[in-house]
Amino acid sequence: GENVEQHPSTLSVQEGDSAVIKCTYSDSASNYFPWYKQELGKGPQLIIDIRSNVGEKKDQRIAVTLNKTAKHFSLHITETQPEDSAVYFCAASISAAGFQKLVFGTGTRLLVSP
Amino acid sequence: EPEVTQTPSHQVTQMGQEVILRCVPISNHLYFYWYRQILGQKVEFLVSFYNNEISEKSEIFDDQFSVERPDGSNFTLKIRSTKLEDSAMYFCASSETGHGTEAFFGQGTRLTVV
């Protein structure tokens, strides 16, 4: 089945710096790649997603890139702020007869220091 | 903003007891999911549910687990005879359509089996 690897497991940056989190997936049939932010005591919240027919997507300070050939996708956060501190999960979605099953990466704990 | 709500937020139960975790998905959503997250680990898919039946389940979702949509608004996960290793955060999610659309997660129920 699908396997998603995520790096790094922890990432510390200074406020204003950029942060990059990388994921790889194993199943070339995966075609939907969401990124979730999880704050302490809360459920995962979607921050951006990308479909396999697109190579890059941007939403203000957040961007995601996808390389289907290499089976890599990455999250880029620019001008980081302390409120960006959280655990970030990448995921890949496999369609089974149209139903969604998200396979998550292991998570990256991002700490943004003021 | 519509949200997925889960109750209770924390459940402590004796090993061998049955527990029911409850979820109210977003009202116009048709696809429902349960995921779990053991402390410090990745979020794992348990089951997806559509049109009053299970559409896919993982190997974790064995005979001790069951799901139900008893009244058209609630979506429940029952664990029949809890084991210590069932201790985890359980997340309910829902999506408007199937594959490739945003899955909205609830805030989770922390299950502790003692």
Image (cartoon, rainbow, N blue to C red):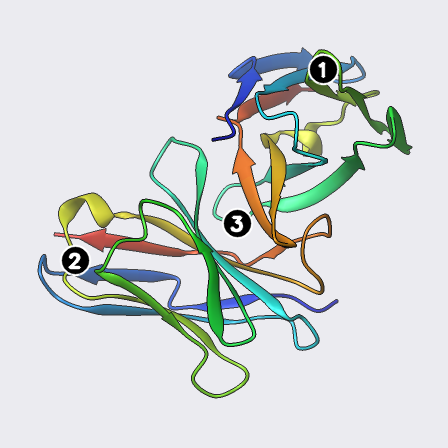
Element type at marker 3? loop
Residue at far bottom of view: B71
The residue at the point 67 percent across, 70 percent down is B29
Question: Which labelled disc corresponds to residue A62?
Answer: none
Query: Viewer-proximal residue, A1 or B93?
Result: A1
Rendering coords of residue B58 (x, y %) = 39, 47
Element type at marker 2? loop
Are tags 2 and 3 found on a single chain?
no
Classify mark 2: residues with Cα within 10 Å, few (<14), some (14-19) or many (20+). Answer: many
Q: Residue beneath label 3, please? A: A42
| Quadrant occupied by the N terminus of chain B | bottom right
Q: Amino acid at mark 1?
A: Val
Spatial separation of the CA atoms under disc 1 and disc 3: 23 Å
Q: How many marks?
A: 3
Q: Amino acid at mark 3?
A: Lys
The residue at the point 12 percent across, 52 percent down is B114
Q: Amino acid at mark 2?
A: Thr
Chain under label 1? A
Left or right, A28 with reference to A64: left
Left or right, B59 with reference to B104: left
Q: Residue beneath label 2, please? A: B82
The residue at the point 69 percent across, 45 percent down is A46
Rendering coords of residue B18 (x, y %) = 18, 68
Q: Residue beneath label 1, please? A: A20
Vertical position of residue A69 compared to residue B56: above or below: above
Labelled pair 1, 3 in contact (Cβ < 8 Å)? no
Element type at marker 1? strand
Chain under label 2? B
- State which mark lies toward you, 2 or 1: 2
- State which mark lies toward you, 1 or 3: 1
